[in-house]
Image (spheres, rainbow, N blue to C red):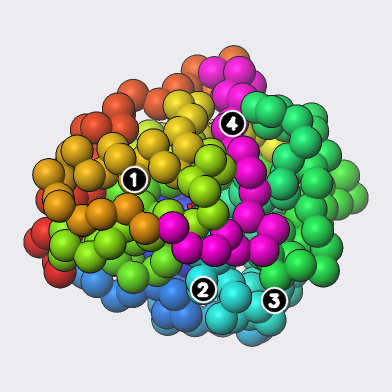
């Protein structure tokens, strides 16, 4: 099969390219390097079935040929990045989605969009099930990301209903692993960077807010299976093991053996208080669930950060 992957030089999509290539398929990757990095695809240079285009999927696309599957995975994903690039974030979920849905439609390809747990906003239901409509502030600082992804889901459903396109929607929860940017502001690289360099570990708020972290190899396996399934409605992909951010900081202290103290800083506006995926649907329709423990995943991630710092 011939796949198109947008955002290919990003953290999650670069691993997804690896997963698809490992099955012997062809991948055409694209990235505009707004938040992606060439280093993430450097190992694929010269790969016989991988080609890469530096392009912006919000612009009219060149002739890329026909595809069997189009995966729209391009977007800033770290809060720090989408606060810095709010318009580009809205564009890639809207104009980018439109362009890539047309690309899929041109060759009657399958289409998968990587959406997000941010569609649930600061959720009033816990854990989050796909049928929950969410609690999103449409004008808050996170809205550029949340509404972009919600629009991306809406236009995907419209193409499915209107044109009969075979589509999938993955709602990705917090993910970590090698190829994350050490300074992208997200909590896993932030705490690891601080612990490894002996700086204070910055817990925002009182640290009682929760997240559930999925190792990247588990996540891309879920995405890859979803891209081959007939499930049209959103599917949560994430690890349901939930931790408070204070517990997570203490876990990082123990694992790295750092002497970094924990310090408390103000909680960002609209920071979701609790987040944990209900993955019953992924288990049922994809026969998928995470395999990598937090300890093992963090060890791999620490080794990567130690190598690249
Ligand atoms: N966080 C923190 N310290 C940091 C960075 C983040 O306590 O240095 C918290 C943040 O307030 C949030 C959680 O960690 O509650 C996850 O933040 P992240 O930016 O990784 O992603 P989010 O899940 O908010 O999109």
Q: Earlier in the sequence, mark 2 or mark 1?
A: 2
| Residue 76 visible, this orientation | no
Instruction: Report the side of 295 relative to 228 (left or right).
Output: left
Frontmost residue, 198 versus 6: 198
Task: Residue 91: give x, y in percent of width and height.
Answer: 69, 76
Residue for badge 4: 277
Percent coordinates x, y for residue 283 in the rendering: 54, 18
Q: Earlier in the sequence, mark 4 or mark 2?
A: 2
- Of badges 2 and 1, nearer the viewer stands 1
**Dominant secondary structure of the magenta stretch?**
loop
What secondary structure is found at the residue carrying circle 4? loop
Label 3 Cα neighbours within 10 Å, binned few <14 / some 14-19 / many ≥20? some
User: What's the CA distance linking mark 4 and mark 3?
Assistant: 27 Å
Q: In percent of the image, x 24 and y 32: which residue is there?
A: 295
**N-term-proximal mark, 1 vs 4:** 1
Left or right of 59 on screen, residue 137: right
Q: In front: mark 3 or mark 1?
A: 1
Q: Where does the magenta region start and end?
A: 264-283
Q: Judge whether 59 appears above or below 11 on screen.
A: below
Residue at label 2?
Answer: 81
- In the rendered view, does 163 fall on the left or right side of 101? right
Task: Answer few, some or many: residues within 10 Å of disc 1's Cα (few below 14, many 20 plus, some between 14 and 19).
Answer: many
Please name the residue that numbered disc 3 is placed on: 91
Is 278 a magenta residue?
yes
**In the image, the residue with mark 4 has its CB under 8 Å from the nearest atom of ligand 1:** no
* Callout 1 secondary element: helix
| Label 2 CA crowd tier, 10 Å (few <14, some 14–19, many 20+) | some
Looking at the picture, how far across and down is residue 194, in whole percent? 25, 62
Image quadrant where residue 26 sits: bottom left
CB atoms of marks 3 and 2 within 8 Å: no
Tell me: is circle 1 under 8 Å from ligand 1: yes
Identify the disc placed on residue 249: 1
């Amino acid at each position: 099969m011939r796949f198109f992957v947008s955002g290919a030089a990003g953290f999650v999509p670069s691993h997804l390219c690896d997963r698809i290539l490992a099955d012997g398929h062809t991948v055409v990757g694209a990235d505009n390097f707004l938040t992606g990095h060439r280093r993430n695809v450097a190992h694929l240079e010269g790969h016989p079935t991988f080609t890469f285009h530096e392009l912006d999927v919000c612009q009219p696309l060149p002739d890329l040929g026909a595809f069997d599957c189009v995966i729209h995975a391009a977007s800033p994903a770290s809060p720090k990045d989408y606060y810095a690039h709010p318009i580009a974030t809205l564009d890639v979920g809207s104009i980018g989605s439109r362009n890539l849905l047309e690309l899929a439609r041109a060759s009657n390809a399958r289409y998968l969009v990587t959406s997000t747990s941010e569609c649930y906003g600061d959720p009033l239901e816990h854990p989050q099930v796909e049928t929950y409509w969410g609690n999103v502030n449409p004008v808050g600082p996170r809205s550029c990301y949340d509404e972009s992804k919600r629009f991306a889901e809406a236009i995907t459903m419209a193409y499915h209903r209107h044109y009969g396109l075979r589509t999938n929607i993955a709602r990705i929860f917090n993910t970590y692993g090698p190829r994350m940017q050490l300074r992208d502001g997200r909590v896993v690289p932030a705490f690891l960077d601080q612990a490894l360099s002996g700086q204070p570990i910055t817990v925002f708020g009182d640290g009682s807010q929760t997240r559930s972290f999925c190792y990247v190899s588990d996540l891309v396996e879920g995405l890859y299976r979803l891209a081959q399934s007939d499930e049209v409605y959103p599917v949560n992909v994430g690890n349901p093991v939930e931790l408070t951010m204070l517990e997570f900081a203490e876990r990082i202290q123990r694992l790295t053996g750092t002497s970094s103290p924990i310090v408390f800083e103000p909680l960002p506006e609209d920071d979701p208080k609790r987040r944990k995926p209900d993955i019953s649907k992924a288990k049922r329709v994809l026969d998928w669930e995470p395999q990598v423990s937090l300890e093992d995943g963090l060890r791999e991630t620490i080794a990567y950060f130690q190598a690249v710092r």
